[in-house]
Amino acid sequence: MLKGIVEARHAGEYKVYLRFEDGVEGEIDLSKLIEFKGVFEPLRDVREIAKVRVDSEHGTVSWPNGADLDPDVLYSLLTGKPIELRHLLVR
């Protein structure tokens, strides 16, 4: 994992504010990131989006229904930096 998320809160409509352990912060519009199908279907309801929380064990965000998002993807979206695949490769 690149960096863990240390703060998450609802930022209105389908947006969440995120702050990473290195200080990178910003808002992400989930309506442009996910399809509201499967485990993400309940998040179609903005009241469910508002239940966002930090999953400190995995360094990401999650919701009570078990939905979560990859912190590397979120970090990449906020910084504009590509995800480094070399740390994911098994040797």
Image: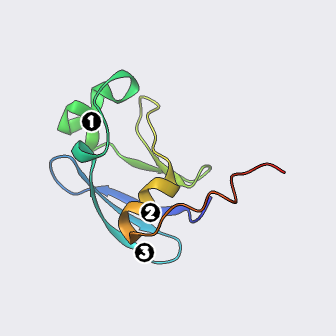
State the residue position of label 2.
76
State the image quarter where residue 36 is shown.
top left
Q: Amino acid at mark 1?
A: Glu
Q: Position of residue 67 (x, y in %)?
A: 43, 34
Q: Position of residue 87 (x, y in %)?
A: 70, 59
Q: Residue furthest bottom?
A: 23
Residue at 22 percent across and 31 percent down: it is 44
User: Disc 1 versus disc 3: distance between alpha carbons?
Assistant: 25 Å
In the visual, does 72 lie left or right of 17?
right
Q: Which mark is residue 48?
A: 1
Looking at the image, is mark 2 or mark 1 earlier in the sequence? Answer: 1
User: Disc 2 versus disc 3: distance between alpha carbons?
Assistant: 10 Å
Q: Nearer the viewer, mark 2 or mark 1?
A: 2
Q: Residue furthest left?
A: 13
In the visual, does 4 lie left or right of 68?
right
Q: Amino acid at mark 2?
A: Ser
Q: Are marks 1 and 3 in contact (CB under 8 Å)?
A: no
Whether residue 79 is situated above or below residue 30 in the rendered picture: below
Q: Amino acid at mark 3?
A: Val
Residue at 27 percent across and 36 percent down: it is 48
- For the N terminus, the quadrant is bottom right
Q: Residue furthest right?
A: 91
Label 1 crowding class (10 Å Cα cut-off): few <14, some 14-19, many 20+?
A: some
Give whichever of 17, 79 is nearer the camera: 79
State the residue position of label 3.
24
